[in-house]
Amino acid sequence: MVDKPFELIKKILTKHISEVLVEKLPDKWEKIGDVLIISLPKILNIYKEVIGITYANILDCKSVLNDIGGIIGEFRTPSVEIIYGTHNTETVHKENGVRYKLDPKRIMFSSGNMSERIRMSNISNNNETVVDLFAGIGYFTLPMAVHSKPKKIFACEKNPISYNYLCENITINNVTSIVEPLKGDSREVSPENVANRVIMGYIGDTNKFLRPAFRCLSNNTGIIHFHDKYPDEVVPDKPLKIIEKEAKKENLDIKLLKYNSVKSYAPGISHYVFDFEVK
Ligand SMILES: C[S@@+](CC[C@H](N)C(=O)[O-])C[C@H]1O[C@@H](n2cnc3c(N)ncnc32)[C@H](O)[C@@H]1O
């Protein structure tokens, strides 16, 4: 029987490190294009070169990054070190018929959000105008433009590095006639009174952006996809109250259509998306 990749990695590394330490090797990874991200326990640090080359060979990657501090700050920047391969870590990740060009050393890409990217690819239609308030490199904008083909998507992004990839990705996916990239803080650059649908794909204080999201809606009507992380036991009541409170300030009514857990964030805490209708 052919060994599974992780079994093969362990078998090779047993020649270089003790059996006890082999058991501490990460059995999960993110493969973004041909760049691999793993998270090594500190105890394996002195072996990171041989570990990097082994993972790269077995999983067919040009570079291996070690996650040393998670995803940080407003721009959701990865904190990683290169442990193997070329320092040119720019790559093209293909998923669901969409090409995402990015540098995983500088820009995040969450494999855990794949189900939501796929859901967004089918949710719109050619009568809609959409505003994506946190477009990044086009995580939701691109699958929606490629597969749902709305009339227009206004894609706002504040991080200049992500914005440049967003622009490139719009071109390589042939959606220049659909997507209009807008560089800057979405509270300042998002268009008002145009949208049938607004995407709020951000984690942490997303409620602070509800007011601009409401203002994007055409005639105060439409659907909003609101993301944030919450303790599982407060969902959906607490986020719903927060959204209702913000809506009341603008004299708007909201109706929750559905909510999904996108992925686990920490024990007892998950990344959720709430779809709600504004009237
Ligand atoms: C990385 S995405 C979130 C992840 C995404 N939902 C996914 O599926 O992987 C969030 C993006 O919002 C951008 N951002 C943060 N604050 C912003 C703001 N005020 N206006 C526009 N973009 C902002 C960040 O630079 C980042 O690219």
Image (cartoon, helix red, strand yellow):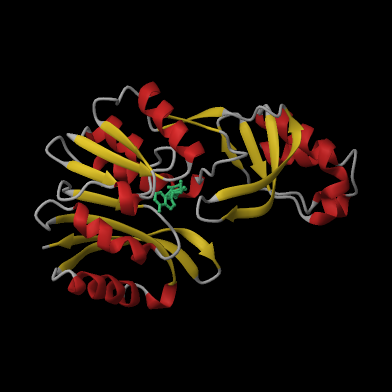
Res 32 quadrant in image? top right
Q: Position of residue 28 (x, y in %)?
A: 63, 47
Q: Is residue 8 positioned above or below 264 on the image?
A: above
Would residue 276 be visible to someone looking at this image?
yes
- Quarter-of-image position of residue 114: top left
Q: Which quadrant of the rendered structure holds the C terminus?
A: bottom left
Image point 32% across, 40% down: which residue? 155
- Residue under the image location 78 percent in, 54 percent down: 24
Report the front residue among 70 and 134: 134
* Left or right of 99 on screen, residue 198: left
The count of marks equals 0
Q: Is residue 140 visible in the rendered structure shown here? A: no
- The image shows residue 123 at horizontal and vertical percentages of 23, 44
Residue 174 image position (x, y, % from top left): 32, 22
Which residue is nearer to you in this view: 40 or 178? 178
- Locate the N terminus by quadrant: top right
The foreground one among 235 and 225 is 225
Q: Is residue 133 above or below residue 278?
A: above
241 vs 12: above or below: below
Write down the quadrant of residue 131 in the picture: top left
Task: Residue at 66% x, 32% y: name it.
Answer: 59
Describe residue 179's horizontal placement relative to residue 251 as left or right. Answer: right
Residue 63 horizontal/vertical position (percent): 69, 31
Judge left or right: residue 133 versus residue 257: right
